[in-house]
Image (cartoon, rainbow, N blue to C red):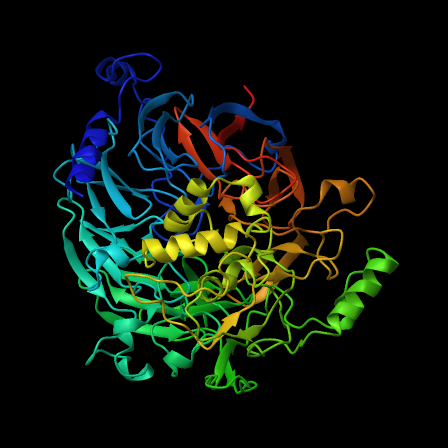
Amino acid sequence: MRFTTISAGLVLALSVAAIAGQPPEKKLAAAKAPDKEGAQDWPVYGGTAQNDHFSSLAQINRKNVKRLKVAWTYDTEESGGLQTSPIVVEGVLYGLTPSQKVFALNAATGKQLWKFDSGIKGTQPDRGLAYWSDGKNDRRILVGVMNFVYALDAATGKAIASFGKEGRIDLREDLGRDPALQSIYMTSPAVIYKDLMIVGGREAETLPASPGDVRAYDVHSGKLRWSFHTIPHPGEFGYETWPKDAWKTSGAANNWAGMTVDQARGIVYVPTGSAAFDFYGADRIGDDLFANCLIALNANTGERIWHFQGVKHDLWDRDFPAPPVLVTVNRDGKKVDAVAQTTKQGFVFLFDRADGKPLFSIECRNYPASDVPGEVAAQPQCLPAKPAPFARQLLTEDLLSQRTPEVHQWALEKFRSFRSEGQFVPFSVGKDTVVFPGFDGGAEWGGAAADPETGILYVNANDVAWTGALAENTSENTPQALYLNQCAVCHGEKMAGSPPAIPSLVGLGERMQASQAIATIKNGKERMPGFSNLDDDQLYALLAYVMSGGKESASKEVVSAGPAPPAMKYHFTGYHRFYDPDGYPAVAPPWGTLNAINLNTGEYVWKIPLGEYPELAAKGLKNTGTENYGGPLVTAGGLLFIGATNFDKKFRAFDKATGALLWETTLPFSANTTPATYEVNGRQFVVIAAGGGKDPKSKSGGVYLAFALKR
């Protein structure tokens, strides 16, 4: 470990080495940022402290948006896809490559100023960066690279040695458990309050999993300032909603989606994920606070102010998937500062920021009980009466695909083998239950945009069905049991996965070397977390089982120096999209939508399909909508910009008042990201990162494209 630390330090010292053949000191001296005059920044993830994705810029507007042209491009020359929204400060754009290298560009020209390589190849999604300044000469970029958070000098890209250890902190530490056994990744950027950097993290969804503590670190030193335990310790609020001592063994209930800070009030709003294990919770009977919650914390101290739990004792992985949006709405002739939270189910919750009082009524009722031995579904569950959901809630026969008579008949027969009863129906053993909208929403991590001028919230949504079921585990300590406990939740019992997001493992031994596979198991990749909880014997037993297609040593006991991972009595059989034999959703369109909701009234302003499949559009089946990831950007120029769609590679601009399409362009890859806009030297730019990765028929990459009006 000592040697590793020294190596990391050397990497940090050399990270801004020669770019384009020049020594770093000459390159940095020549790399000047644009003039600060006439500039407007996009300084935080989400654009503003309110995380509303809104810009007051109006140079690009309804009348001239058709004149938008590419102003510059920056190719990271990497594959793998991007989910990053860049930030722009004082004419400099900061972004990430698919492998989590950090770069700075002249935001007017796209010319590279510096590039930082930690020496660690990032394999997880990395959605953005954070910026902090003392208002003078100390300006820092705070960025996650896998389980580390680095503090970089914004001017040079060099790691700041006084921060943490050699310029970084390790998120596996400060959790009250053995750091070597923790799995946590910085997929969403930190939020900044004064001199605090507040972080969450992505964690394993099977046991053992790390606790989902929300933590604040000093931006100068990297020292921990406070922690909030999302799995309460003895004596803490919510402890009685878990079995005794669950805080020692359970995990997750983590903030993976990002947070939002009310800078004036000093409140950080934290949406949390489900507790592990996602789909069977016999070891966590109770409501499980603070999983699946929106929590308002004192940003100075981490103390709870109020909370709302969206799903009690979650059995469906129905966590809050995006940072909340701070808005001001009209109520009875008065202005009310509110916080809006979107959900995977397709709902918007709206609360008073100060006390958590719902601004639209919330209706609670009992739902079906679980019939799985040992499981106790929580009662009641609660949903808002307004606004109406922005995704369909119950799949019935009349909502099945009519794309062809043959497809409809196939879908009908398949559907009749499922259980479909709407929301909060616990999974059964041996029979698939419909989840509609699917596990990826409804809303997803891209988040919503809000127009402070009108109180309208804009949210893109998925509207396809998935299915899932439970199956009984054995008590054996075999490679097969290890696979079912740790891997089947995503890849399924038969290793088929749910491509492209969750790849099939069938035939893995024929297309991947053992060394590559073991690195992926250890470190994770894209949606897959790393399994640092497994020792070498367990890892290699699991590797042999997977590489052999489930045949090798399936019944042989795993001889391991460490304890076997906790075995639940039931495992999830895998995420399954309800797709037809041709690979399209087996439900009727729209398969993805873009929605405008007036938060003053709770009524919809407009709703349109978002995205299409090019091959279906060529046959006349247009405007179907598609799955989409990444969020919208709204401007004072009357526009809403969005990429997000998985298959058509389009970047679009809509009239924010009507939903009318005003402009579109085709990108080199689909942009499963959120765009940003800024002004430099009096010129407005709109930038988006395009990397693809969601369409198995297309390649992935990592290109940033900036658009401006043609001169």
Side of 485 where 32 appears, left or right = left
State the image coordinates of residue 166 (x, y, percent, origin top left).
Answer: 16, 38
Say above or below: 432 vs 84: below
Taking the image as shown, residue 519 lies to the left or right of residue 230, namely right
Q: Residue at x 63, y 55 (%)?
A: 593
Q: Residue at x 64, y 57 (%)?
A: 606
- Expressed as whole percent of the image width and height from the top left, the position of residue 69 reads 57, 25
Q: Nearer the viewer, residue 709 or 534?
A: 534
Q: Quadrant of the N terminus?
A: top left
- Looking at the figure, which quarter contains the C terminus? top right
Looking at the image, residue 37 lies above or below residue 278: above
Closer-to-camera residue (202/672) = 202
Return the residue nearer the eye: 392 or 63.
Answer: 392
Q: How many marks?
A: 0
Residue 450 shows in this picture: no
Image spot of residue 629 (x, y percent): 54, 49
- Give residue 172's quadrant in the image: bottom left
Q: Position of residue 489 (x, y in %)?
A: 50, 64
Query: Eyeballing the image, is 519 above or below 178?
Result: above
Whether residue 85 is visible here, answered yes or no, is: yes
In the displayed structure, 333 sits above or below 443; it is below
Q: Residue at x 26, y 66 (%)?
A: 297
